[in-house]
Image (cartoon, grey):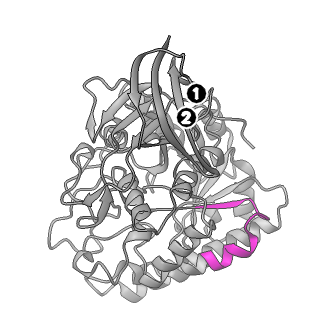
Amino acid sequence: MYDLIIRDATIIRSDGRLVADIAVEDGLIAEVGNLTSGRARQEFSGIGRFVIPGLVDTQVRARTPGTLEGPDWGAVTRAAAASGVTALIDLPDAEVTDPVADLEARLAAAEGRAVVDYGAWAAAPADLLDDAGPLLSAMEGVAAVGAVLRLDDPALPWAADDAALAAALDALPGIVGVHAEDAAVLERAARKWEEVDDPVDNDVRPPKAALAAVKRLIAVVRERPESRRVHVLGLSTAGELNALDPWRGDLPITAGITPAHLFLSVESTERLRRVLKARPPVRTELDRRALWAAVKRGRVDCFASGHVPRSLPARGTSYWAMPPGLPGVDTLYPLLVGAVKNARLSMERFVEMACERPARLFGLVGKGAIEPGRDADIVLFSEGVTTRLRRALPLSGVDWSPYIGREVGVAPEMVIAGGRIVAREGALADDPGAGHPVRLGPRP
């Protein structure tokens, strides 16, 4: 007898749709097909409903809401579970003094507290080129998908030196995440605006900083035919798209995109300008439209929330004193479903970029598909049911959202993570259970 069967659901995949029954046993998908003779302890009707794999969010910061003083996997994963995200990858902070201790502490804090499955990015240490051994040892055998290189910090050796950047790519295991803003361009822009109390974030960190960094990355990877895969964290400008597009499929460079850069722009959010500080910044309407066009054409690889659980900054806080970061782990699914309703995005592309491709890119075993043998991470919902986001969703512990007023999809009717029903219609189950470290495939 199976643990659970969903009958007659429409399964959405990037290559089409399938009406079938789904059987779950021991946390895995046991069968997909016509299971008329199968029996289960729990059965649910999927008639008139869609089923997709649980979303994979590869860019979150699992910190204490508001203060960010330490890891809080409970808050971020509860919010994720209620909104259809069943696997999270945690980013390191911008300034990490001991990347090995930081990675170990973040993963240890998740154990027994995370409601869904979890992994982490490591921070690349400044002395990586002298001795990569400690970080490599720390990443071995744990749920670390790769390490993050920052090109925006002039103190790091690879920020301006192409040889150092190439050596760093060689030294790191797994996929290499890159925060692509050029440090020299940022320094010049900061000097220009430093006497202005309330500048626009997009001016202080201009699009040409992102373009310069991506061009450097392309040039370095082009010289290295055997280079490991590089992933740009947070594509945000039309210039980056134009630089990357000719090399797509030929170079091992992929890119993620966040809702902040698809749904917000400098022009459309003037009333929120004082609090819309992000990394990379919210860009212009021209950039936003170019990114949507790229999504529709399949020229961007995956979605990620970019979630940073900061409280709404107090009125009067200066731009320079205000820390960056926007919340969003709980609005990733609703915003994308709203985009499907308004024909900005097909359901198949949604599943490809939010579920299938991030699982494949980051080597997450068992994730990203409704198939026998995969993890039973399942989202059940009805098509076309939307609402207006009236207030911040409560489970993340963050008291505001930059997406208030947007048309969004309602919460999924049911979210299953590892075979456990963790949420129904936006409400967390009384006993959602605990997630596990993601399992990783062979590293390149």
Give the farthest residue toward the top.
1
The front one of 422 and 160 is: 422
Left or right side of 129 for 323? left
Q: Amino acid at mark 1?
A: Asn
Q: Is residue 231 magenta?
A: no
Q: Amino acid at mark 2?
A: Ala
Left or right side of 225 for 231? left
In this rendering, the answer to whether 116 lies above or below 262 is above
Q: Is residue 161 visible?
A: no
Tell me residue 243's x, y (percent). 67, 78
Question: Which residue in the protein does label 2 denote?
Answer: 20
Q: Which corner quadrant holds the C terminus?
A: top right
Q: Is residue 253 magenta?
A: yes
Q: Is residue 46 visible?
A: yes
Tell me residue 355's x, y (percent). 54, 47
Q: Residue at x 60, y 76 (%)?
A: 240
User: Disc 2 on helix, strand or loop?
Assistant: strand
Tell me residue 196's x, y (percent). 29, 87
Q: Residue at x 45, y 78 (%)?
A: 205
Q: Residue at x 23, y 67 (%)?
A: 405
Left or right side of 220 for 288? left
Asked whether disc 1 touches disc 2, contact meaning CB atoms under 8 Å apart, the reply is yes
Tell me residue 211's x, y (percent). 59, 78
Left or right side of 102 for 358? right
The span shown in magenta is: 241-255
In this rendering, the answer to whether 146 lies above or below 347 is above
The crowd level at tag 1 (other Cα within 10 Å; few <14, some 14-19, many 20+) is: few
Question: Which residue in the protein does label 1 denote?
Answer: 34
